[in-house]
Image (cartoon, helix red, strand yellow):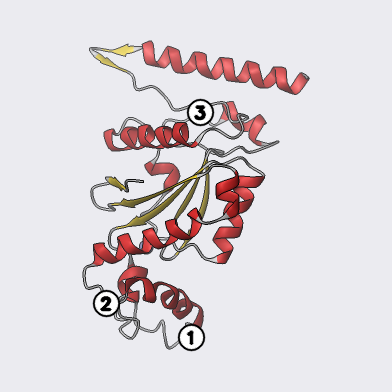
Amino acid sequence: MKIKTKRLATALITGAIVLASAATFTGCMPMPAQWTRDPSEHAIPAERGLQYLKDGHERYLAGTGGTHNFDADREILGEEQNPFAIVLGCSDSRVNPELLFDMKRGDIFTTMNAGNFADDTSVGSMQFAIEVLGARLIVVMGHTGCGAVISSMETADLSGLRDGFLENGSNELQGILGQLAPIVAGTTDVMVATRANVEASVARLAELEVVHYHDVMVVGAIYDVGSGEITWFEN
Ligand SMILES: [Zn+2]
């Protein structure tokens, strides 16, 4: 009970800070509202979670996000986590879910690999996030200029990878490309291949029993590493 009371107080204080910052004006321009939510809220519905991400991405594009108060959530997050979204993304250093959605710790459960492919390891991680942590939204996010997708389009041609990679032994890397190759086979357009790769993972995830049981929404998207824009796939 004591902890719950503390949490409530923290949430109220955080809310007050947000309202205060939203109401503070610098000249004619209102200060941007900081992103916040009660990190102890469990199983946020997918539609609301998707709106959180879309709103956060608008802040990212507008350059109005990123001033998070991490202290407010530290005590709660020391005890639990309740991410409302899972992002399956590429390990590419230009793809950073928390940054591009202007989120805080505890909001997004991320599973990343080269090529954002729903392999068994990432699927297992997502099952945990759904069953135990209450995530009800999965975003499979490909991106422009994905080296894994480009290299998979012709697995025999690994010229997109740095010299010396193969010489040093790269069975595991070839394993990744081998998973993607059947999906992008016959495609010469990188964006078509990128989309096909995302759709393949969306299709696999949509079939999972845990996804059906918990009414999880699975959404595909492509992030443009140049412009910062996101193209969302229609469900
Ligand atoms: Zn990539």
Image mark for residue 169 = 1
Asked if the residues shown at circle 2 and circle 1 are in contact, with their CB atoms under 8 angstroms apart, the answer is no
Measured in 3D between alpha carbons, the distance from the residue under mark 1 to the one under mark 3, in whole angstroms, is 44 Å
Side of 175 relative to 227 (left or right): right
Residue found 57% across the figure and 15% down from its top: 12
Residue 20 in the image: state x and y as whole percent.
43, 12
Percent coordinates x, y for residue 31 in the rendering: 33, 19
Q: Amino acid at mark 3?
A: Asn
Which residue, given by chain and number where applicable, does mark 3 sit on?
Answer: 69
Q: Secondary structure at mark 1?
A: loop
Q: Is residue 151 above or below residue 44?
A: below
At label 2, which amino acid type do we have?
Gly
Image point (45%, 43%), residue name: 98
- Looking at the picture, does residue 48 appear above or below residue 136? above
Q: Earlier in the sequence, mark 1 or mark 3?
A: 3
Whole-angstrom CA distance, mark 2 to mark 1, is 27 Å
Residue at (25% x, 66% y) in the render: 190
Q: Can you tell which quarter of the image residue 187 is in?
A: bottom left
Q: Within 10 angstroms of label 2, few (less than 14), some, or many (20 or more) residues?
A: few
State the SS at label 2.
Answer: loop
The dot on residue 186 is: 2
